[in-house]
Image (cartoon, grey):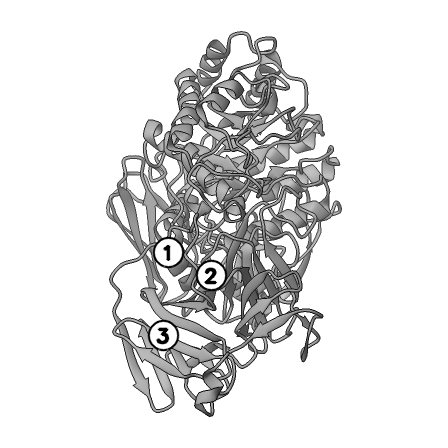
Amino acid sequence: MKFTDGYWQLLPGVEVLRPRDVSEIEVLDDSLVVHAPTRVITSRGDTLNCPQLTITFDSPAEGVVGVTIEHWDQPVATPAFELASGDVDVRTRRLDDGAELVSGELTVRVRRSRPWQVDFLHGDRVLTSSTERSVGAVTMPDGSRHVKEQLRISPGEHLYGLGERFGPLAKNGQSVDIWNADGGTSSEQAYKNVPFYLSDRGYGVVVDSPDKVSYELASESVSRAQFSVPGHRLRYLIIDGPTPADVLRRYTALTGRPARVPAWSYGLWLSTSFTTDYDEATVSSFIDGMAERDLPLSVFHFDCFWMRGFHWTDFEWDPATFPDPAGMLRRLKEKGLRICVWINPYIARRSALFEEGKERGYLVRWPDGSVWQWDMWQAGMALVDFTNPDARAWYEGYLHRLLDEGVDCFKTDFGERIPTDVVWHDGSDPQRMHNYYTHLYNKSVFDVLVERRGEGEAVLFARSATAGGQQFPVHWGGDCESTFDAMAETLRGGLSLAASGFGFWSHDIGGFEGTPDPAVFKRWLAFGLLSSHSRLHGSNSYRVPWAFDEEAVAVTRRFTKLKLSLMPYLGAMAERAHTEGLPLMRPMFLEFPDDPATAGVELQYMLGDDLLVAPVFTADGDVTYYVPEGTWTSVLDGRTVAGPRWVREQHGFDSVPLLARPGAVVARGAVTDRPDYDWADGVTLEVYAPYDGLERRVVVPRPDGSEAVFDVAVAGGELVVRAAGAPHGWGVRVVGGAEARGDGDELRMSSLPE
């Protein structure tokens, strides 16, 4: 939200109270409380009729500083984000010209003298600052109140995050409202809004409010990041690094880390698509067609019309289309498949659940007590009130029934179009509930899966989210067009979400709306199968590869089997997502923060620590991508590329730039027909561009929860691998050099490539 007309003037009718003085700094054991009059105080008389702002600095976690700006006292409304907290070693002290608070290596220093100045430092290096025109309590022409803050952006600094946003990856110059919306992937709206941005200077800022947070990032003041919230109170947290990856570790420690997801979920998912005609015969023909063409398939998904039209959501299979759902699911599972079904949080008027939910008070209501309804999607839809524990249990009971039938997981669609003029069971502020509703919805469904399947076996396919939603993976990118442009939008959205703390992410291969050109579909296949999770899904057309051409079948086979062979590597990266909060798919700046050329790179990514992926966005295969310093090696054909430089290449549909970084050791599995195998059994360690002094530890998770650990070292031209917990039959291949198999706990090789 913009408040100014240019830099000096306010917009007509806008009034802003700013700190002009510091009357007192209370230095407490664990916090600083600053009393800041909004005029310069030179005499007693100046204290009359003088509004004052109260700014409190504290530390909810090591390396994190909380800032609370208050005009008038305002109780903290609900809902609120659930942030972790604990005992923190906080140090406070007075200074000659103010005071400071230290948490870990992060310091906040408040100046007592005029003008207003607050610096946030990592050690002795200033990360950002709040300055003379930064803080403000704002009154708008309509009388509404807001509190704002502006933090300094240094020359050359770039800001990322704010959820899954489909425009430029670096948010500098953008105006962003944190407000969940079902707006597709081609506008400023987003399904997943997160009030957190990440700076490549090695700090992050999260606004601790699920309300509508408005950001002006180098757009109202070109050297400031502004954010504001409605009301009289703004709380935000500065999160220290020193690297962007360290910031994500701290941020996800506060808001929650992604749960482990089952190994089978990394395989290929195939859908009925949305409005297409299908029944059991159609579904079986798809599945049998995949098997006949040697296309490994792990999950089959039934989209909306597994239920009857006008009845969403009643959790009942359409009897005209699926007369024997339990038998059908049994037959599909006998083919080794997992089953996903589409759900949403709305109850249509014709659903058998509507009257039941209405009578029991399980549906969101208007202020007059009647059930809130609309005709979007299905006639007379009401909304389940997840703030009501009994409503949650009621909704979850129907999920248990589906799990009893053989369903394994759920696609939790919708959750964005949440009304703000309603009454919630627990008295929540409806404005704050708009963004937060998705958190309650997805948590409820995820908890059912954890209860029934156990931790590590629960997985969603969710569209909407806010801060903390990364705890309930997986999320997908929403409704995109079936074009190269939309493919690029989708990738930007996924990388923006990764910079917002989400470890797992997927998208509709080929796009959702319309039918993709075969070239778009084939290029999207490589991107989709080199993503954390991979799904073939569309709107009004099928996404089986042979519907496009025979080459699409071959491309699907190639990249599906490639992904399955990478499961030992991907499984280890997924474990880091769970334990550290680092995403599988990473924007380049996150992995190479000291390389300024990566700041604007947004159409390629790192898949884990060691693999660079540059999807091809053209039919003719022309692609340009950036390679950081060192000798990088193609995983597909062994050629090398030296960086740092931009590279332009031509790729066939069966190829994509997939490069291993210098000194990478990538664990490749022995199985290419399913993702859920013992990844360590028969594993091969592929060593890329080894160099003297190389030391790497490779950890491969195993199905029983144990790990195979390989310590790789190169010294004097000899490569030594020591293994612990590994089964017999593991091996090492130096790409461009020798290969050997190991049968014990040590293997030595001396024939390294030049």
> Which label belongs to residue 33?
3
Camera-side residue of 31 and 293: 31
Q: Where does the image place residue 675, in percent across and percent down from the top left?
A: 44, 34
Q: Amino acid at mark 3?
A: Val
Q: Where does the image place residue 421, in percent across and percent down from the top left?
A: 58, 42
Pick the quarter of the image with the N terminus. bottom right
Mark 2–mark 3 contact, CB under 8 Å?
no
Is disc 3 surrounded by few (<14), some (14 to 19) or many (20+) residues within 10 Å? some
Measure the C-alpha gap from mark 2 to mark 3.
20 Å
Left/right placement of residue 53 relative to residue 493 reads left
| Res. 737 image quadrant | bottom left
Is disc 2 surrounded by few (<14), some (14 to 19) or many (20+) residues within 10 Å? many
Camera-side residue of 439 and 324: 439
Residue at 66% over, 46% down: 185
SS at mark 2 in the image: strand
Residue 684, placed above or below residue 628: above
Camera-side residue of 46 and 724: 46
Is disc 1 surrounded by few (<14), some (14 to 19) or many (20+) residues within 10 Å? some
Residue at 41% over, 24% down: 394
| Disc on the earlier residue, 3 or 1 | 3
Q: Where does the image place residue 744, in percent across and percent down from the top left?
A: 24, 44
Residue tagged by mark 1?
254
Is residue 644 in view from this perspective? no
Measure the C-alpha gap from mark 3 to mark 1.
23 Å
Is residue 331 in view from this perspective? yes
SS at mark 1 in the image: helix
| Disc on the earlier residue, 2 or 1 | 2
Q: Amino acid at mark 2?
A: Val
